[in-house]
Amino acid sequence: MRAKDILITGADGYIGMRLAHAYLELTDMPVVLWVRAATQEAFEAKRDRLEQQFSRYEARISYESGDLVKERPFDSVDPRRIRKIIHTAAVTKFNVDPDTAESVNIRGAEKVLKFASQCDSLEALGVLSTVYASGLKTGVISEVPLEDVGFANHYERSKAAAEAKLIRDFDYLPWRILRVATVVADDQTGHVTQFNAFHNTLKLLYYGLLSLIPGNPETPLYFVTGEFVKDAVFRVMQSTASKAIYHVCHTRSESLTLGELVDIAFERFARQQEFNSRRILKPLYADAESFDMLGTAVDTFSGSIVNQALSSVTPFARQLFIQKEFRNERLVSALRDYRSPDPHQLVRNTCDYLVSTKWGKEEGNVVRTGN
């Protein structure tokens, strides 16, 4: 049996589904779409949704399921068929609890690596990580293995640990690590189909629920679009170079600061009569100690709106004080035609989309208000 398939884990996730589209549309490779499902019923529901998305390519797709917390999540996949693997399955929430981070992002990743070791014809293994695997490291961060300098949350820690395990114990595999920045929109239009901490923070600001924000307004923030991530991963996986780390992000000079983000958001919000009628002021910037003290104080009001607002920001708050300068030379070399979007326009478009659709609840109401 000649190996010719690509296995995509987390194939029903935001990045996994985009990569599935790319391989089905741009190659003739058979694609194995692996989804997390604890029961047959859950698997069938996910498979049905994917079949609707990919009905044109039915003959080239096989659907498999498993659970990364279980002992043998890839038993249904024949390793002799697999030529490439892209591992996207993970828990990506900043507030993930330590046990889940350990069982899914670390031990689950190890199970993927063990399965990859059984694929005798494996040509390429892509493991999606995050730029936040750099933890609390400051200054220049290159596309090289990381040192443990502490972390802001269990998500960061778990992704760094998964990277370290790959490099330490599975270095014989043809691996590539792709550290992805925060995805803020599907593309440059600002359309959003998956919401994360970035969008939730903007929502808190819009409704006046976050009058104090942790961080230094000069802290750089690294944003990308889903399209950019898909294209970058696809191109890197086409490369014959292995044992390499790529930063799927833009450089500091191509990115915004926290202060610029807040300024742009409030400028776009101010175009809405609803927002202006509430006379909401820009948030004040709190130092780490002050924000921690506030969080401790409102913990006594568990369940309150203020408590919920602060608790949604707290898991990544420490990152908003850290000056990082990500380098992406290896990625630029792999892409060749690399271009960074206008970060100001990307955030403007995203804010307009969020406001006009009430954060995706009223999709038909998208309104562009100009530059």
Image (cartoon, helix red, strand yellow):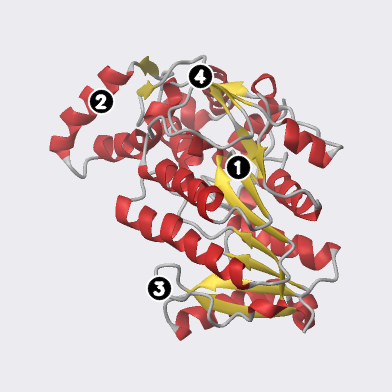
Q: Secondary structure at mark 2?
A: helix
User: What kind of residue is marked 1?
Assistant: Val
User: What kind of residue is marked 2?
Assistant: Asp
Which disc, if any, is residue 323? Answer: 4
Q: CA distance from mark 4 to mark 2?
A: 20 Å
| Of the pair 35 and 364, the residue shown nearer to us | 35
User: What kind of residue is marked 3?
Assistant: Lys
| Of the pair 252 and 364, the residue shown nearer to us | 252
Which mark sits nearer the N-terminus, 3 or 4? 3
- Which residue is identified by label 1? 180
Q: What residue is shown at x 52% (from left), y 49% (from top)?
A: 168
User: What kind of residue is marked 4?
Assistant: Gln
- Which residue is identified by label 3? 70
Q: Secondary structure at mark 3?
A: loop
225 sits left or right of 95 in the view: right
- Which residue is identified by label 2? 292
Q: What residue is shown at x 17% (from left), y 36% (from top)?
A: 299
Q: CA distance from mark 3 to mark 4?
A: 39 Å
211 sits left or right of 162 in the view: left
The answer to the question of whether label 3 and label 1 lie on touching residues, with beta carbons closer than 8 A, is no
Q: Position of residue 328 (x, y in %)?
A: 70, 31
Which mark sits nearer the N-terminus, 2 or 3? 3
Q: CA distance from mark 2 to mark 1?
A: 28 Å
